[in-house]
Image: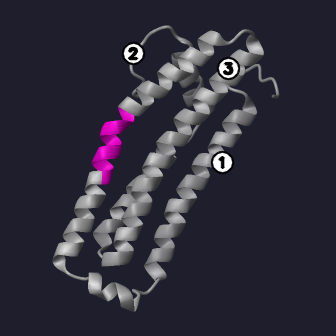
Amino acid sequence: MAEDDRGMVPAEDLRGLQILVGAFTAGVVLFAIVALFVPMFAELKELEGPMTEVALFIALAGLGVMSALMWPFIRSAQSKTARAAIARAADASALRRAIGEGLRIRVMVGAALVEGFGLFGTVVYLLTRQPLALVAPALSAVFLLATFPSRERLERIARELTSSGERPLLD
């Protein structure tokens, strides 16, 4: 791992996480763009109807709400695991690896939850052709870009993970 004297977050970890979140964002956006140009398939016509659309939109809303409600619990459990690994670190190298792993898990799980919501919204759009469904991938892409990994954000999370406090990390 390359040493970086600017803080606890190695440059390769920062770059890797930026690439990961960029890929999640690109996946959501590109899938939504493709959906705009894919014609409805003949076999999907039997799924048409107001009840099918209502059910799909309820499922989409449920996924969004569930992800938002579960994220603090997932983040808290991940933080406890990361803090335990950090506490067990025997030397500076092990500490940097434990911090890096905590950051990777935090970013990957959060981005995956958001990406799933956006991708499911695109699937709902493909099935219903209701433009309202495209709100999900738009929100997903905006959130992913708004929380894009930066050195400052990762340093703050690293400081929280290495602190002894048990406060939930709801940044």
Comes first in the chain, label 3 or label 2: 3
Q: Amino acid at mark 1?
A: Ile
- Determine the secondary structure under disc 3: loop
Residue 101 position (above or below residue 95): below
Which element is circle 1 on? Answer: helix
Q: Is residue 6 visible?
A: yes
Q: Residues within 10 Å of mark 1 (few under 14, many from 20)?
A: some
State whether residue 116 is above or below residue 105: below
Q: Quadrant of residue 48?
A: bottom left
The label shown at residue 141 is none
- The local secondary structure at tag 2 comes to loop
Asked whether residue 96 is drawn in magenta, I would say no
C-alpha gap between disc 2 and disc 1? 29 Å
Observer-side mark, 2 or 1, equals 2
Which residue lies under the disc numbered 3?
Answer: 8
The residue singled out by tag 2 in the image is 167
The quadrant the C terminus occupies is: top left
